Amino acid sequence: MSLKHAILVLLETEPSSGYDLLKHFKRSLGYFWNAKHQQVYQQLKSLAENGLITYDVQTQEGKPDKKVYAITPSGIDELKRWLNSPVKPSKINDALLVKIYGGHLADNDALQAELEEHIHTNEQTLNELLDIEKIYLALPETERNKYQLPYLTLRRGILSEQTWLAWADEARKTIKK
Amino acid sequence: MSLKHAILVLLETEPSSGYDLLKHFKRSLGYFWNAKHQQVYQQLKSLAENGLITYDVQTQEGKPDKKVYAITPSGIDELKRWLNSPVKPSKINDALLVKIYGGHLADNDALQAELEEHIHTNEQTLNELLDIEKIYLALPETERNKYQLPYLTLRRGILSEQTWLAWADEARKTIKK
DNA sequence: TCAAAGCATGCAACTTTTTGCATAAACTTT
DNA sequence: AAAGTTTATGCAAAAAGTTGCATGCTTTGA
């Protein structure tokens, strides 16, 4: 399982609260690792119980207290161990494709409408990613080199979204008939 | 949840045993809906308990008995209901990308090797899909029209794999440095 | 001829993920 | 001024998914 490891990856770059981590997660690993906020809090709890991370409670005025989590040396060991062992094949669960596969029983207008909606959200995601890419490309070279690997994953996102949209165009034509 | 619905989709086209359904599943919906054999058997059981499918036990000589499942009218209702309600957004869990994101702590050679392995399996998958496409394209037009929607999902698979491989090429260059 | 792969299903235990709810203050929009 | 969003966390229960094991006969390949 590797939400645990995804969290360790993020905490290795900087300590943060569950809430901040979640925001960070959504703009990075979240594009290719699915997780709800509950799950992140649950995993933080269990990682702390297992000594892979620790936390300090920071009291704040006017805002709820936060627990700031940081990775421990044994957390770093575990992260390295995971990084150097083979990952599990990626999992996809795409209900829209299941629906299209069995779409002859569906209402055609509804199917079309749903496709358009998905196109819309995918365009938005693509734009977000392109915005992030712009920021990256504007960095000085030394900075860019530091983020080469995360940038690769960003590229993956961009290419995926573009391909998805290209496919959706094929799909639109077929379904409209 | 829609493994249930994926199963209903397949049983709506033809009744079959869990085992046969599983084989069928792997060559179709399995490309974009992840499920282990256990899960399929468990869902078949629960679908039968809920009256959405029924089964006949067929005794065979020299082979284990099989349960041949078929969709019931209420199964078809449920399938239609699902088809006409909005699907959940697709989920991706791609550990390789998490690894690359945090890859500065990883052993570079191991990372490279793992990428090459993934490239290999993706090439194989692409070839499988292209073979299926060949068969489809060789069908007479009336037949092709029948399978237009499943064909769309096949196109999705092909485009995804091709894009993945194109990305992997970018990745290879970055990681080699 | 011996091992491996295919046929065919499933229980039991465990882990992971999802869903729904709950709290509560501060700031922001209509 | 009321309504909604953001900040910040989490319990509890249910649903879904994974892992490991078990059975036993037949066919195919080395």
Image (spheres, coloured by chain):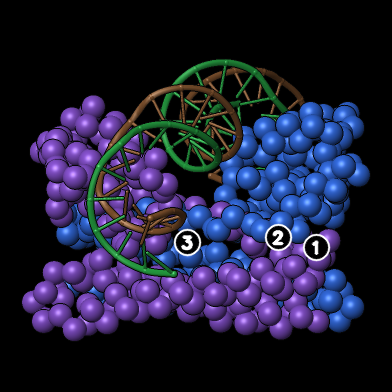
Chain colours: A blue, B purple, C brown, D green
Q: Is residue B160 left or right of residue D19?
A: left
Question: Can residue A124 be seen here?
Answer: yes
The disc label shown at residue B106, or none: 1
Report the mark closest to the observer, 1 or 3.
1
Q: Is residue A60 left or right of residue B81?
A: right
Residue A18 pos. (x, y %): 75, 39
Q: Chain of mark 1?
A: B
Cβ atoms at labels 2 and 1 below 8 Å apart: yes
Q: Classify mark 3: residues with Cα within 10 Å, few (<14), some (14-19) or many (20+).
A: few
Residue receiving disc 3 = A121
Helix, strand or loop under label 2? helix
Q: Residue at x 59, y 78 (%)?
A: B167
Is tag 2's residue or tag 1's residue first in the polypeptide sequence? 2
Mark 3 belongs to which amino acid?
A: Thr
The alpha-carbon separation of the residues under discs 2 and 1 comes to 8 Å
Residue receiving disc 2 = B99
Mark 1 belongs to which amino acid?
A: Ala
Residue A13: image quadrant is: bottom right
Q: Chain of mark 2?
A: B
Dots 1 and 3 on the same chain = no
Looking at the image, which is closer to me, B115 or C5?
C5
Residue A37 pos. (x, y %): 63, 39
Residue B23: image quadrant is: bottom left
Looking at the image, which is closer to me, B50 or A21?
B50
Total residue callouts: 3
Looking at the image, which is closer to me, B165 or A138?
B165
Cβ atoms at labels 2 and 3 below 8 Å apart: no
Mark 2 belongs to which amino acid?
A: Lys
